[in-house]
Image (cartoon, rainbow, N blue to C red):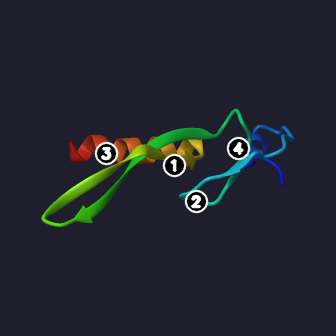
């Protein structure tokens, strides 16, 4: 499988991951490894698990998710 973002740049690069959000194949240069806290309802409250879960995204989805989280803040 080839990196979708590299194909747009007329390059052929082997993909190393798949974006969790859009499903595009991405190479090591274009993948964004972001951490996401995992929350679980426990009793009357909420527990956060350590370590945070791995969240592999392409650069487009990473940028979009950061913008949404900034707007919610």
Q: Are marks 2 and 4 in contact (CB under 8 Å)?
A: no
Quadrant hosting residue 12: top right
Mark found first going from the N terminus, 3 or 4? 4
- The quadrant of the rendering that contains the C terminus is top left
Q: What label sits on residue 5 in the rendered view?
A: 4
Rendered view: 47 above or below 8: below
* Residue 68 in the image, given as x and y percentages of width and height: 33, 48
Q: Which residue is mark 2?
A: 22
Q: Are marks 4 and 1 in contact (CB under 8 Å)?
A: no
Q: CA distance from mark 1 to mark 2?
A: 7 Å
Q: Which residue is mark 1?
A: 61
Quadrant hosting residue 27: top right
Q: CA distance from mark 4 to mark 1?
A: 12 Å
Q: CA distance from mark 3 to mark 1?
A: 12 Å
Q: What label sits on residue 69 in the rendered view?
A: 3
Q: Nearer the viewer, residue 27 or 53?
A: 53
Element on which disc 3 rests: helix
Rendered view: 16 above or below 1: above
Position of 49 compared to 43: left or right? right
Mark found first going from the N terminus, 4 or 1? 4
* Residue 34 in the image, given as x and y percentages of width and height: 49, 40
Determine crowd level at label 4: few under 14, some 14-19, many 20+ residues with C-alpha closer than 10 A: many
Quadrant hosting residue 71: top left
Mark found first going from the N terminus, 2 or 4? 4
Q: CA distance from mark 2 to mark 4?
A: 13 Å
Q: CA distance from mark 3 to mark 4?
A: 24 Å
Q: Measuring 23% from the left and 64% from the top, which residue is drawn there? A: 42
Q: Are marks 3 and 4 in contact (CB under 8 Å)?
A: no
């Amino acid at each position: 499988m080839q990196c979708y973002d590299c194909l747009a740049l007329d390059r052929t690069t082997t993909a190393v991951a798949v974006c969790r959000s859009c499903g595009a194949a991405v190479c090591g240069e274009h993948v964004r490894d972001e951490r996401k806290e995992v929350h679980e309802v426990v009793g009357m409250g909420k527990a956060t698990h350590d370590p945070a879960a791995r969240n592999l995204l392409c650069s487009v989805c990473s940028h979009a998710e950061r913008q949404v989280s900034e707007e919610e803040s």
